[in-house]
Image (cartoon, rainbow, N blue to C red):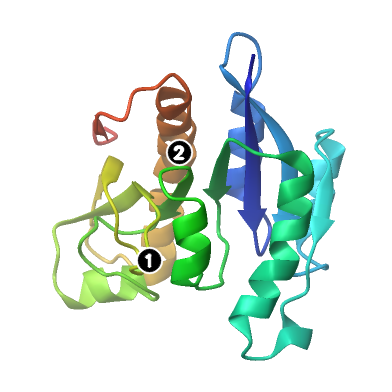
């Protein structure tokens, strides 16, 4: 029996595509839904083209009422009964009530070496700090932003002349390696931390 995976996105969904593409063959999980808070998110069309059911719950009509938005978000999730939720560029902060409901069953990827640089503008902050390396982290989602047990990290060197955009592009390559690898391990019941070797 394959584990059922729902993937939440807000934009183009490049990490979502890598996750979906990985869940084939002897993989212990299968994608059952790609869900977005933006009906115009480019990733929805990409998911549909890959044969994955899609849905959208526009957050904007809910204003600042996050609980009401999450209640609406829960409806399409409940309909597919996922075993795991993967946040893949989902740009909404989730309430403690939502994260508690999915405790231990929700993963996120963040473009920094947590616990460094929680939140936004991670690459600019790494460059401003003069860091020698940057990278990405997959972690379990808890009520605290970009917190929760770390399940995996991948590192890239910061190069002379790097800008936030050039660094982000190299980190994204590693995100596409790390997230599918961690998802497979979690689906197999292995939550030991995975550290990918830096690219040559």
SS under mark 1:
loop
Which secondary structure, mark 2?
Answer: helix
Q: Is residue 24 visible?
A: yes
* Residue at x 53%, y 63% (from the top left corner): 98
Q: Report whether 135 appears left or right of 102.
A: left
Q: CA distance from mark 1 to mark 2?
A: 21 Å
Q: Residues within 10 Å of mark 2 (few under 14, many from 20)?
A: many
Q: Earlier in the sequence, mark 1 or mark 2?
A: 1
Residue 38 coordinates in the image, percent (x, y): 75, 70
Q: Quadrant of the N terminus?
A: top right
Residue shown at the point (64%, 57%) measured from the top left? 9
- What's the residue at 47%, 60% (across, down)? 99
Q: Residue 141 in the image: state x and y as whole percent.
A: 40, 55
- Residue 179 is labelled as 2
Instruction: Check the image and report above or below for 46 versus 71.
Output: above
Of 13 and 104, the residue lying toward us:
104
Disc number lying in front (1 or 2)? 1
The residue lying at 86 percent from left, 39 percent from top is: 49
Q: Residue furthest bottom?
A: 63
Instruction: Tell me the tag on residue 143.
Output: 1
Residue 116, picture quadrant:
bottom left
Disc count in the image? 2
For this rendering, which residue is in front, 166 or 81? 81
Quarter-wise, where is residue 100 in the image? bottom left
Taking 180 as reference, is 44 left or right? right
């Amino acid at each position: 029996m394959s584990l059922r995976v729902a993937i939440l996105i807000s934009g183009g969904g490049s990490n979502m595509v890598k996750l979906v593409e990985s869940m084939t063959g002897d993989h212990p999980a299968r994608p059952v839904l790609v869900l977005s808070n933006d009906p115009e998110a480019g990733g929805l069309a990409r998911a549909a083209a890959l044969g994955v059911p899609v849905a959208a719950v526009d957050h904007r009509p809910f204003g600042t009422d996050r609980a009401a938005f999450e209640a609406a978000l829960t409806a399409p999730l409940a309909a597919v009964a996922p075993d795991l939720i993967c946040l893949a560029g989902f740009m909404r902060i989730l309430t403690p009530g939502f994260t508690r409901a999915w405790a231990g069953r929700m993963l996120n990827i963040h473009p920094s070496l947590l616990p460094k640089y929680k939140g936004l503008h991670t690459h600019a902050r790494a460059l401003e700090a003069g860091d020698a390396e940057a990278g990405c982290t997959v972690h379990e989602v808890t009520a605290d932003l970009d917190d929760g047990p770390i399940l995996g990290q991948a590192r890239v060197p910061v190069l002379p002349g790097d800008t936030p955009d050039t660094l982000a592009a190299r980190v994204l390559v590693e995100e596409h390696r790390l997230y599918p690898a961690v998802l497979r391990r979690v689906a197999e019941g292995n939550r030991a931390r995975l550290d990918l070797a830096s690219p040559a």
